[in-house]
Image (cartoon, coloured by chain):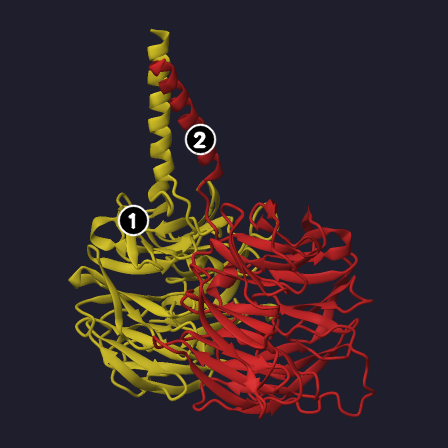
Chain colours: A red, B yellow
Amino acid sequence: MRILRLITFLAALTAYCLAAAAQSQLRGTGDLGIVIERANGSVCVVDTSARAILSCVEGFGDLSHASAVFSRDQRYAYVFGRDGGLTKVDLLEQRIVKRVLQAGNSIGGAISDDGKLIAVSNYKPGGIKVFDAETLNQVADIPASYGADGERSKTVGLVDAPGRRFIFTLYDAGEIWMVDFAEPGEPQITKIGRAGKLPYDALITADGRHYIAGLFGEDGLAHVDLWRSPARIERVLDGYGKGEAKMPVYKMPHLEGWALAGGQFILPAVGHSELLALDAETFKEAGRVKVHGQPVFAIARPDGRQVWVNFAHPLNDTIQVVDVPTLKVVHEFKPGPAILHMEFTPRGHEVWVSVRDANKVEIYDARTFEKRGELEMRKPSGVFFAARANRIGL
Amino acid sequence: MRILRLITFLAALTAYCLAAAAQSQLRGTGDLGIVIERANGSVCVVDTSARAILSCVEGFGDLSHASAVFSRDQRYAYVFGRDGGLTKVDLLEQRIVKRVLQAGNSIGGAISDDGKLIAVSNYKPGGIKVFDAETLNQVADIPASYGADGERSKTVGLVDAPGRRFIFTLYDAGEIWMVDFAEPGEPQITKIGRAGKLPYDALITADGRHYIAGLFGEDGLAHVDLWRSPARIERVLDGYGKGEAKMPVYKMPHLEGWALAGGQFILPAVGHSELLALDAETFKEAGRVKVHGQPVFAIARPDGRQVWVNFAHPLNDTIQVVDVPTLKVVHEFKPGPAILHMEFTPRGHEVWVSVRDANKVEIYDARTFEKRGELEMRKPSGVFFAARANRIGL
């Protein structure tokens, strides 16, 4: 009887152990990524070397307009949902590690340069909250209060800056703030100044030097050179759409894809079927590119030689590719209905394109434009690769 | 008896399985790196988040002047030894996966943008060889033959360029060549042209656009703009040391650390106690910085705001930090005897410094200059972090 129990115990232990071993296949994490399945509140973990889905994980809540950042070991993604959910997902085990509902309505986040702090940009209640990246315990709550009544502004364009800092923009207040966690204790908050009317999104350059906010309420952009002390806001591209008929804006462009490419920033114009080229030194307009429709993302290939552009509804079945030195469209193709996002592999050999209404992510050679693969997903939107962990501002 | 055998079998299986599980602790690889222990032919695998050594692995042969690249999943490092050894090491299991002695005398290598090809730069026999990154099987052998007799030149400055290309420089021939693996079948070799006398090292900018070779036999540098078609060589900074007394060169500077920082390249001058600033647009001299000694590495912090410099013997106990906008030395300290290399964490919050003759690697906050940690290693030299996998030219 004792022997039988021993055998049963050993057999169970072996079975458990073998199951655990199968689960814990060693693998690197540098080539992993995630794709947001918007309609299902799920996230698919993908392998960009194998061009494959490892597994799709449910339970992320409302993922409309979701985005993500990655831990510095590239094992975890932090997914920012629209419902105020901040969810930490393990890419190796493909499971949710922790999820907190930290606000009522959110719009993206950032991770500090040391990988220790996660900041989330909230519409409601307006402000940012900061969490410990390990535990998701709250570290700081920074209400975006403004004006005499202390009303709270929605926040947008939240990014990391070098030195455990975050920069963000107050949509309703039209201001840009910086919060600095370099010293232990309470963070230092600096109200950099007034950006203009209705700043709707922002970006920071890959070197963490220039923060640029787009304005919906005015023609122009707000620029902060963070190498200047004290930092202050300057208006750039003032009146870039002046004199032309105002056009309806079908979808607000995203600014994140902007990149310094060949000494210029290439960025989508709001409400125009154009890209604007901005000289990276003088911050003056350096040219324009007529494109197929109202651009949503204008994303530079990592070498900066080309910029890939997708468009607002109803022209969102098309991608155009712009050659940076000549500012000419050199390629156009139609991957399918509702192209929502594009993400390049870190050194730019391939690009993943989410085609929502075809329920597919398509993978292209970023030079020859040949299709290299295709993955079935349910209403895929944002595509985020783990290499973002090692970039300032992503 | 049968029962006893069953018990023994199950017990053995359980023991094996538990041992395997202990070995195969799941972990991300984005924050790993290696440090070369030069004197012992060993490589220490390090964790930059924990600031810890995971394990040191022996058996790499002659590691004087060794360097490394990383697989795109950031699980493997490829170490290039001086003895022609190419060794693939598993960072997760901390063991050598494969080692080939592919030449008699080598100097560095590169990995293609898709992560599939490893190229090695050889002195003897002069040329480059290319290997499959998975198996280390040879894929191509490209002799650097020149002149009427078909003599073979040492090769230096081998880097990856976007589109499965490699660029390298022929030391004896004074030429720059490109080899293109974009199409299946035989690689396309392009002899770009004549660089000048004794090109000793080269780099490619982070966007893969500009390839620049330093010359030991002449005052000046050779520059190739790879966005131009056909690519051709132009001389820049011609005669930067002219009129001054020639100084003995204690150690040839390395070019790899150069970075585009604030619109300038900052680079070590050969034989002078100076850094040169090169305007990134015009490629003209934009300024000079007097420094403590003959610079060996001038490495930009990832945000480009500062450049950290170490020096040739006998002044190699000192690091100086240069502020890029003002071109002024803003900090100087002496970590210890024989500082051989510096490597920043990918977003620049910390920097690892190898202090060979103190048998230590020291870890500093890259902003406050406070020491954050210290690891004992045996004659440490090169420090390489896995995030290089995701950068062009590293």
Q: Is residue B245 above or below residue A353?
A: below
Which chain does tag 1 point to?
Answer: B
> Which class describes the residues within 10 Å of circle 2: few (<14), some (14-19), or many (20+)?
some
Assess disc 1: are there few (<14), some (14-19) or many (≥20) residues with their C-alpha within 10 Å of its C-alpha. many
Residue at the top extreme, as displayed: B1
**Residue at 58%, 68% in the rendered image:** A103
Residue B123: give x, y in percent of width and height. Answer: 35, 54
Mark 1: secondary structure: loop
Q: Secondary structure at mark 2?
A: helix
Instruction: Work out whether residue B21 or residue B143 is closer to the camera in this orientation and state it.
Output: B21
Residue under the image location 78 percent in, 77 percent down: A249
Closest to the observer: B307 or B314? Answer: B307
For disc 1, the marked residue is B83
Q: Nearer the viewer, mark 2 or mark 1?
A: 2
What x and y, as percent, mark residue B218? 36, 75
The residue under the point 30% across, 82% down is B274
Which amino acid type is marked by label 2?
Tyr
Residue hosting label 2: A16
